[in-house]
Amino acid sequence: MPVIKVKRPPLATGEKFYLGAVFKGFIITLRHAIDSMRGKTRGAKDLASSGLGATMQFPEQRWDDHMPEYYRGAPALVTDEQGRERCVSCQLCEFICPPKAIKIEPGEIPSDDPWAKVEKRPKEFDIDMTRCIYCGMCEEVCPEQAIYLRKDYLITGGTRAEMIHDKKKLYEIGGVRVGLVNKWNELK
Amino acid sequence: MSDPASTAEARLPKDIAAEKGMVNVQIDGVWRQVPKGTRMIEACRMFAVEVPHYCYHPKLSSPGNCRMCLVQMGMPPRPAPGQEPVRDENGYESIGWMPRPVIACANTVGENMGIRTTGELVEKCREGVMEFLLINHPLDCPICDQAGECRLQEHSVGHGRGQSRFVDMKVKKPKNVDIGPRIRLDDERCIMCSRCIRFMDEVAGDPVLGFTQRGTYTTLTVHPGRKLDSNYSLNTADICPVGALTSNDFRFQMRVWFLKETKTIDVNCGTGANIVVWTRGNKIHRITPRQNDEVNSCWMPDSHRLNFHYIDSDHRLTEPLVKKDGRHHAASWTDALAAVRAGLDRFSAAETAIIASARMTNEELHLTMELAEARGIEEITTVPRSGESDGILISADRNPNTTGARLVWRREDPSFRLAGILDGVRSGKIKALLVLGEDLTEAGFTADDLAKLDFIASTQLLAGPTAEASDVVLPGAAFAEKRGSMVNVTGRLQRLNRAVEPQGQSRDDWEILRDLAGRKEPHLIEDVFKSMAAKVPEFEGLNLSKIGDLGKAVVETGVTIPLLENERARKAAGQIVG
């Protein structure tokens, strides 16, 4: 392997003492201190709370209102306006999931169900949130518009078992989503 | 030199090929020699040129109804009277390409024929066929079990246009139809290739399927008042290029792209059908037949295919058990093996018998014989298990390895001592039994007979009367959990491969036998085969890897498989490609 020796640029006399740089830092800090006293820092209004505004007072204050549109939080399953669970357990998300966080047990929809023509839905749908990396691949790969990354970011639990979101929990987070393609509806 | 016939060395390629019964065919611009009478699609396949198709199956007749295998064909133009054909410097005539395509599946090759599987004409044809097939095809892929191994999916990626131009309503057809105990039909997904109809008619000999209606309303149905209940019905799900016919047993169990394939053999009868075991993790999800033209062609019976659920059922034994005060207690392998050895040591060799099984592999039978010889035990037998042959694939011998037992034990009938052992048990002459994988109640032993014995040790897969009566139970491995070899009824040595790990603490049977003999060696099953091959002349020069996926014929038994006879007759009659 060829080795290239890089020569450091020689320091000027002033730089060798670096006292100037230290003072520069002091001045920047001082400027921010004065700004925050005057209530001029960035986000001062949004984050206004018991403090001076520069720091969010978590958990009394939450990120919820400050989330950008594209924020990727916890993945969740959704139902549509007809109350149908969108997921048909095709297991593409399970396949694509890079950290293998998703585990699906497919099941058949009984023939007396109003959505019996869909034939298939998940019996179990577990997402291990200790594994999930919030990449959003599951949402991207889903052919049925059934899984979405929501804005939930506070995924905590006292045990590993608590960190596994089961089907019930996933639908709870996901809620109802309207305006999706309803390809399973009976055509008129 | 201008006249090619004037010199001996300048012979024409057509004559050179004709001497070997071949013809010259130009496939995608390259001249090839192909046996005369070969179908164009097979000629292409010989040289790794894949022609997409749906309805064509080499083991079935070729009605040519899917039109997917259209290729461009050309023959040399017919010379005018008195005119010599024009040849290029290699002696081939120039090809006059036909302006319309032909199907490659039902046409045979001819001398100096040209086949083009690419080009504008062919590609446009395929695109057109794909578009027509997809007009009424539902968007079921997310719920369809065939997804991932669906020809329509594959070809629509390869030859489809990606978007539908069809604006009308799709034709509605029956979905989720119960046409048989093991098969589910979805008529909307059907592309009318008629493979299933031909299979039921030509191979299974139970023509219950057929088309009704016409045009886009063509519907696959089962004959009124009948069900698709043949013991070969699941093969129709295998050959269905789309998800119209799917297996009830595998329905919604697992998507195929998660499954790992292991090539092994079926052990439900003496035929030893070649199979693929599909697993995910340590669970078997399905079994499908694997093509072997010397054993099972492309098919297998449903009864054998579905006989794998016991492997991880509740009845499966997963721990060594030692009986104390009339109850079984879980024990360690060391203790259980020591208990068997101590138990057998209490009795003389004449008081002991070994009942092995012709369901064991050659290697296990070999180690069993060595164990018997080391202990001086004379009474060693297998249990015969016969039924009726179904005239297709199921052999009358329901033991998969009777021929193997014959070869390895050097006995004409490996089970001839069974009656003697039963008498010995009843008369009290035999006091200890080592049972390997058999349930003795199936072999004619009653509960009273078993109660008479002072000591029974058995290797068992499942809980049952023999396991119940045993003083020590050693959990063995199921067929999909072990490696080894078996010889089928026709004398073909075939190989078992491990698809899943043995459940719980259960162990490969050959290891149990080795440990029972108190030996440390051999460490590998390859070494067991080697020591066996030294004693069995039929296995000379072979090892497990040399057996290969398709097996090796090692002995003539004179037994034939009816399905293969039928297939050969149809091939000779030119009905199928074979």
Image (cartoon, coloured by chain):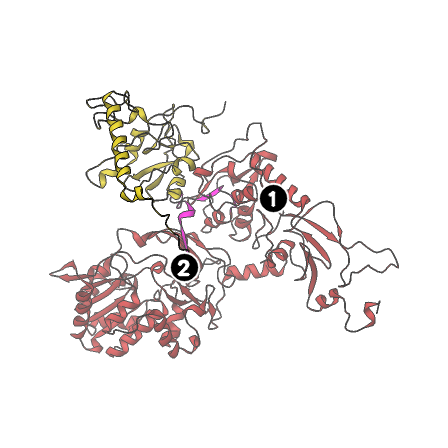
In the rendered image, residue A8 lying in the magenta stretch gets the answer: no
Which of the 4 image quadrants contains residue B508?
Answer: bottom left
List x then y, in percent, for residue B502: 30, 58
Q: Which residue is mark 2?
A: B266
Residue bounds of the magenta highlight: B240-266
On the question of residue B284 being in view, the answer is: yes
Chain that is coloured red in the picture: B
Quarter of the image where one finds residue B90: bottom right
Q: Residue placed farthest to the right in the image?
A: B82
Q: Which residue is mark 1?
A: B66
Q: Which mark is residue B563?
A: none
Give amino acid for label 1: Cys
Residue found at the very far left of the displayed protein: B325
User: Circle 1 marks a residue in which chain?
Assistant: B
* Residue in front for this viewpoint, B542 or B161: B161
Element at badge 2?
loop
Q: Secondary structure at mark 1?
A: loop
Q: Is residue B476 left or right of residue B100?
A: left
Labels 2 and 1: the sequence-earlier one: 1
Instruction: Give the CA separation, mark 2 to mark 1.
Output: 33 Å
- Chain at tag 2: B
Considering only vertical position in the picture, is B315 above or below B91? above
**Image quadrant in which the N terminus of chain A is located:** bottom left
